[in-house]
Image (cartoon, grey):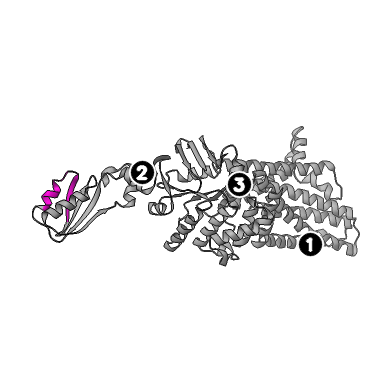
Amino acid sequence: MNKILILMRRELQSYFTTWLGYIVMAAALLLNGLLFNAFALGDAPKYSSDVLRDFFFFTSGIGMVSAMLLAMRLIAEEKQNKSLVLLFTAPISERQIVWGKFLAAFLMFFLLNILSLYLPALIFVEGKVSLGHIFAGYLGVTLLGAAVLAISLYASALAPTQLLAGVGAAAMTVVMLLLWLLSARSDAPFKDILAYVSIHNERFRPFTMGIIHTRDVIYYLSLTGFFVECAVRATEQRRARG
Amino acid sequence: MIDVRSITKHYGEKKAVNNLSFRINEGEIVGLLGLNGAGKSTILKTLGTLLQASEGEAWIAGFSVREQADEVRKHIGYLPDTPPLYDEMSIRTYLEFVAKLKGVPRSSVKKHVEEALDQTNLMAVQHMKLAELSHGFRQRTNIAQALVHRPKVLIFDEPINGLDPVQIVEMRDLILSLKERHTVILSSHILSEITRTCDRILVIDQGTLVAEGTEEQLRGKVQDEFDVRLELTHEPPLLLSSLQNMNGIKDVIRINSTTLSLLCREELRPEIARVVYESGAGLLTLQRKEAELETLFLKLVRGENDRL
């Protein structure tokens, strides 16, 4: 655990010392603010809960892109800079390396969400929403973000460069997103399987409405764990290859 | 301290290392010498737990590189040919990170880092960002990261690569200073450098060990002829034929009117001095010329005995 924290701290610091963290956060907050103003609030009168629902919908999209940007560099950058050899010759396991990096990216993503809290708070000025709805929405965004972080981390473990890792992460995430479309055009049992696996549509919508299903939480946690472990396996193979 | 037994490493059909065995004792500095692609880096990567040998086994500090890689990692400092640095960090924060990563207790990190900074002469620039450093300082930081946790064994892959002459001299002194506390194995394709820093040389060619020993021992193995330079006050008429007729002298070459070069198969300097004295010439110089190191190296790795 100690090694995971050591690596996590270094990764967290690097987000700020390389400006990547600032840039991703600034861009995400700017887009969040624009979309909140233009679409979530809109011109027509709306119930506060609908404003909040739309906010979480837009935020989920920006969150997924931010998660990809935060995670695509994690291992691929080390390969490009040839610094992975430092980790591979140190008494630290592949699991510790991957989880340390994942936790750093996750904390950055979490911080990004916290900084956007002022937007739903604005609804209180002229409306009324429940704190439970806000909590559920943010839980959904965080779980979805964690899953995309894990997918992107896996892409980063596979790809030789950051750019290819980004492309790979985007491709995998888009496929996971569009599975619900495929599900709509499939027959049972594939219809149910594809709908179950799809990362956003049916899984995420309840959170935007303030509803937390245990099955959805378990789904996102499982997906995150699965892809982080895939990244662990890919890193083990990389270490074995030399 | 290092025990390598019958290691073979395949890359597909190609054998990068072929049935290689050697031992290195505690406190020794041993150099792997070979041409590019000879298999030096593969051997060091295997010892550094970065690669697994296809066959054979190696032990470092009593731990199996294959079976106890994590224990081995606690006892080695590995210096790759490209410094594994994070450019956004300062030297000091980087070394603190590496020390913690390599298991130095939190309470000792500061002491370990300052010792490494001191050993590598980086104290004055410790707060500089790694991105701002010259190649020489980056290589020093590379060494500092390898020794910050005080490992028993240091593995250096081409430590003088890309350094300028001043930096090479500094690096040489630094490596020699490490002998007191570490066992060092390093690789290079520059014979003159390896002979100045290493107690023993392992000559590698196409993944096999072709020779092993000190510089003198290696010379003895390949040098079956050598040049004796003779400088005289004047050359009497019969001296040249007397020298040519001596047993053990293969050839006599005139360099100028008073200097001769004698190609000898054995040590004949006392006999040559006597012949010169009996001829009546005054002897100014009688010197055995050592073959160029590079020539010896070529003979070792290619068996080109006929080139000398």
Relative to B249, B216 lies left or right = right
Q: Residues within 10 Å of mark 3 (few under 14, many from 20)?
A: many
Q: Which residues are magenta?
A: B239-254
Along the line of sight, which residue is nearer the eye, A51 or B96?
Answer: B96
Check residue B241 for magenta coloring.
yes
Q: CA distance from mark 2 to mark 1?
A: 74 Å
Q: Position of residue B275 (x, y in %)?
A: 14, 51
Q: Position of residue B296 (x, y in %)?
A: 32, 48
- Judging by the rendered image, the residue that carries numbered circle 1 is A38
For the residue marked with disc 2, what is the amino acid? Val
Q: Position of residue A4 (x, y in %)?
A: 69, 49
Q: Residues within 10 Å of mark 1 (few under 14, many from 20)?
A: few
Q: CA distance from mark 2 to mark 3?
A: 34 Å
Relative to B77, A227 lies left or right = right
Along the line of sight, which residue is nearer the eye, A71 or B287?
Answer: B287
Labels 3 and 1 within one chain: no
Image quarter (top left, top right, bottom left or bottom right) of the C terminus of chain A: top right
Where disc 2 sits, the SS reads helix
The answer to which quarter of the image holds residue A46 is bottom right
- The residue at 19%/46% (across/down) is B249
Identify the mark nearer the N-term, 2 or 3: 3
- Judging by the rendered image, the residue that carries numbered circle 3 is B74
- Judging by the rendered image, the residue that carries numbered circle 2 is B301
> Disc 3 is attached to a residue of which chain?
B
Query: Closer to the observer: label 3 or label 1?
Result: 3
The answer to which quarter of the image holds residue B89 is bottom right
For the residue marked with disc 1, what is the amino acid? Ala
